[in-house]
Each structure stands twice: as C-alpha cells, then as structure tokens.
Amino acid sequence: MKDGSAFLNDNAQRIADGMIRDAERLRIAVSKGPLGETLIDAGSKAPGGIEAGLRMAEAAMGGLGSISAVMDRASDKWPFALEVRSSQPVLACLGSQYAGWNLSNDDYFAMGSGPARALARVEALFTTLTYRDTASSAVLILETAEPPPMPIVEKVAKATGLAADKLTFLYAPTQSLAGTVQIVSRVLEVALHKANDLRFPLENIVDGMAAAPIPAPHPDFLAAMGRTNDAIIYGGLVQLFVTGPVEAAMNLADQLPSRVSRDYGQPFADIFTQFKGDFYAIDPLLFSPAEVLVTAIETGHTFRRGGRDSAMLERSLG
C-alpha cells in the first residue's frame, strides 16, 4: 500500500476513542498523564475484560484485522478460541501488531506494539517493511501493569514526531483477561514474523486467518506468560494465502509449525526458566503456531503441516 494509505494510527485512534466512550461498560480506566498523553488501563488497576482485550487487539493491528471470540467445537477442554483475520496481514501484523519496540527506562520495561511503530520506524524490521504511516495522533499498546513514565512518553513523542498530548497508550498486564486476549490474538502475527525470518517474500502473503484457544488468566506472571505462549505454540492454527511458486509455498509450510523447533515439547514457562529468563536464548523457531495451512492461490494447492498438541495444552492450560 502507498505510504499513509493504510491509516493505521487513524484506525486505531477511532478504536481507542470508542473504548474511552465505553469505558464504564468495558470496566477500563481512562486518565491523562503529566505530559497530556491519554492512558487507558485495560487490566491493571481497572478490571477490564475480554471485550477490552478484543478492542486492544484490533487497535494493535491498526484496524486492519478482525478479531472475535468464537466457539471451538473440536475442543471439549478449551471450547472458546480467538479468531483473527486480515486481508492486509503484513501491515496489520508486522507493521503494527508485532511487539518490537523496546521501551525501557531505569526499572521500567515494556515492549511496544501497535501502529505508533509505523510512525517511529526505529526497529530493524522497518528496513524490510517500506510502508510509512502518516497521522496526527498515535496509539501504542503496552503489555505491562504500569503506565509509561515521563521519559518513555517523551521518547515515543520524539520518535513519532508528535506532541505528547497526541499519544494514546493502552496497557494491560499478561495476568489480566484483556492482556491474555490481546497476546493470544498475535497467533497470526507470529506466523508472519516467522515467515519473514525464513526469508519468504512478504509481498507474496496476501491474506491470512488464524485461531487459538483462550486460556484462563493466572495471577502469577510466569504462569500467565506460559499459558498465552502455549495457546499459540501448541494450540494455534494459521492459514496463509500466498502467491508465487508452489514449491515456495510447500517449503514455507514445512518450516512454519512450532514443532520444527529444538525447544518444542515443554511448557513455555519451563523453557523460559530453563534459559534463566533469556528470551534470546530460546530457539526463535519455537514462536510459531502449532498447525499451519499454506494455500498457493495461483494453483489451488494447500499444504498442511503440524497439528494441535492436546497433551501439551493439558499440561500448560490445565
């Protein structure tokens, strides 16, 4: 898409404004920070909920994704799932939803996701993604229990070229309902990110849809993080529709499922502990859906690989 034509931040701003309007119904809290930034607490001191998480997730995708909670009749133990769809999956997932912006200051740390990233373009990923968003306001999603401190707000304002009072931060911890939903909604995004790591041409990915079970939140951070990751790694299903050589589609399907990783086969919380909390020591091939379908739309071939791992879901999700 042409620069500015996806309206990622404009779309997300409309979603955020709707959340502000419906704050009482969504059980979220809205306030202004010291620099005039808008703060939306969707699950920290405010209880939030599933609907707040769904809207956070759609804001994270810059309004280019559709996310809903659906019944999964194939599963007796985890009968509800998140369904994610996008007809602009590269922009929605990698250009917006991916949590790739490292925002840290003293003892504050958060990874920023959402369309403000496409204004700031400070990540290496944007050497591959050529799209530049244009907007008069920006939205950023933070997976944390605390609002961003002033130095982080100033950093985001400088990087996006906007005044602080034009920024909206939505935040919720992993342990919350909203946090759980918005993290599991990345099931399509992890497939796109892995496809990029595998050097599959992103311009050949033209559509995508995905689903993953909604785990129960857990008050312990490590357990909550484990459940949200395992919902995707052992329970996620993704279908990508691609153009280009059919052999490339087949090769992508071969390499995309999580079970190709050397670290596959343990609950994520155990893996994280084994590597002493170092995300970068974990095999990056693990961060992908359990089951994939890659459809070569020019030939009609569909390649199915991987599968849901019910035993691992039982160990992790309970």
Image (cartoon, rainbow, N blue to C red):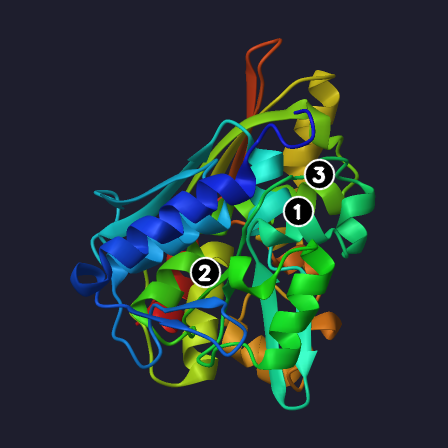
| Residue occupying the point 30% across, 58% down | 20
Q: Nearer the viewer, mark 2 or mark 1?
A: 1
Q: Which residue has dot 3 on it?
A: 132
13 displayed left or right of 278: left
Q: Dots 3 and 1: beta carbons under 8 Å?
A: yes
Dot 3, how many residues are within 10 Å of its Cα: few (below 14), some (14-19), or many (20+)?
many
Q: Label 2 sits on what residue type?
A: Ile
> Can you give x and y, in whole percent of width and height, for residue 183 in the image?
45, 60
Q: Position of residue 61 (x, y in %)?
A: 50, 45
Q: How far apart, in angstroms, are the residues tagged by discs 2 and 1?
A: 19 Å
Viewed as shown, does residue 145 lie left or right of 151?
left
Q: Which residue is mark 2?
A: 183
The answer to whether residue 57 is above or below residue 224 is above
Looking at the rendered structure, the secondary structure element under dot 1 is: helix
Residue furthest out toward the left: 25
Q: Residue at x 57, y 43 (%)?
A: 93
Residue that numbered label 1 is attached to: 118
Q: Which of the 4 quarters of the picture holds residue 134?
A: top right
Q: Residue 258: image x %, image y %?
A: 59, 53
- Marks 3 and 1, how far apart in space? 6 Å
Residue type at the position of mark 3: Arg
Q: Which is more N-terminal, label 1 or label 3?
A: 1
The amino acid type of the residue labelled 1 equals Ala
* Count of numbered marks: 3
